[in-house]
Image (tube, rainbow, N blue to C red):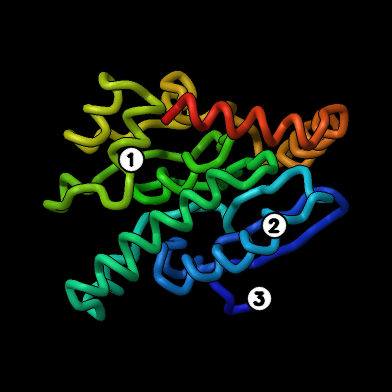
Amino acid sequence: MSDQPVLFSRVAASCRLTLNREDKCHAINEEMIESLDHYLNEIENDTTLRLVELTATGDKFFCAGGDIKSWSAYSPLDMGRKWIKRGNDVFNRLRNIPQLTVANLNGHTIGGGIELALCCDIRIARPGAKFSNPEVMLGMVPGWMGIERVLNQVGPVVGRQMLMLGKRLTAQEAQAANLIDEVVEKEQVESWMANQLAQLEKCGPVALAHIKQLILALEN
C-alpha cells in the first residue's frame, strides 16, 4: 500500500480519491490537504470525467477530522494561512468542481470529516457508520466552515444537538436528518456507483455543470 495521504484511481469516466492515513483514522493534515488539491487540479478541467468518488481505505473510519497533533508545528500566522485558509480553499474547490461528487463514507465520520463529506454532492454511508461533531467536548470550536455547513445541511434542531452537545448519529439517523442521502451495504457500493454513472451518461455534462453551479449559488 502506498504511503501517499491520498490515492487516485480511474476507470473510464469515473475516478476515486481515497484517503490513506488509516493508522491515523484518516485525520486531515497539511499533506492530505495538498494532495487533495493536486488531484482536484487535474480533475476539475477533465471534461471526460463524469463522477468523482471520495472514500477512504479500511472499514472503520472515513475521516476523524483534523489531525490535532500536527497543529503544534504551526505558528499563529501559519495556523491561519496554512491550515484554516488553505483548508477552506481546498474544501471549496472540491465543492465547486463540475463533476458529480459522491462521498462514499466507509466508516465513522467525525468533525472535519463531516465537513469534507458535505463538500460532495451526494453522500452514502455504511450501515455501521457513526457521525459526530465532538469538538465541544474537547473544549474546541469546529474549524473551517464546519458550523455553517452542518447547520445548512441538517437545520438548527439537529445541528444544535450535534454542534453544542456533541450528539452522535447512526447512519440511519444521519439519513433521516439529511446529513447523508442513502445507507448502502459494502457489497452494494460498486453496483450503486455503476448505476449513478449510467444515469450521468444520460445527462449533458455542460448542463449538469451549470445546474450544479446554480444550486451552489442558491445555497450560498
Distance between the alpha carbons at the discs numbered 2 and 1:
30 Å
Is residue 196 among the parts visible in the rendering? yes
Q: Please name the residue shown 51% across and 47% down the image.
A: 107
Q: Nearer the viewer, residue 117 or 203?
A: 203
Q: Secondary structure at mark 1?
A: strand
Tag 2–tag 1 contact (CB < 8 Å): no
In the image, residue 81 sits, relative to residue 177, either above or below, namely below
Q: Nearer the viewer, residue 112 or 216?
A: 216
- Per the image, the residue denoted by label 1 is 132
| Disc on res. 43 | 2
Q: Amino acid at mark 2?
A: Ile
Please indicate whether residue 32 sits to the left or right of residue 84 in the image. Answer: right
Please indicate whether residue 130 sits to the left or right of residue 104 in the image. Answer: left
Mark nearer the N terminus (1 vs 3): 3
Q: Please name the residue shown 64% across and 67% down the image.
A: 7
- Per the image, the residue denoted by label 3 is 1
For the C terminus, which image quadrant? top left
Distance between the alpha carbons at the discs numbered 1 and 3:
29 Å
Q: Please name the residue shown 47% across and 39% down the image.
A: 118
Q: Position of residue 178 (x, y in %)?
A: 46, 23
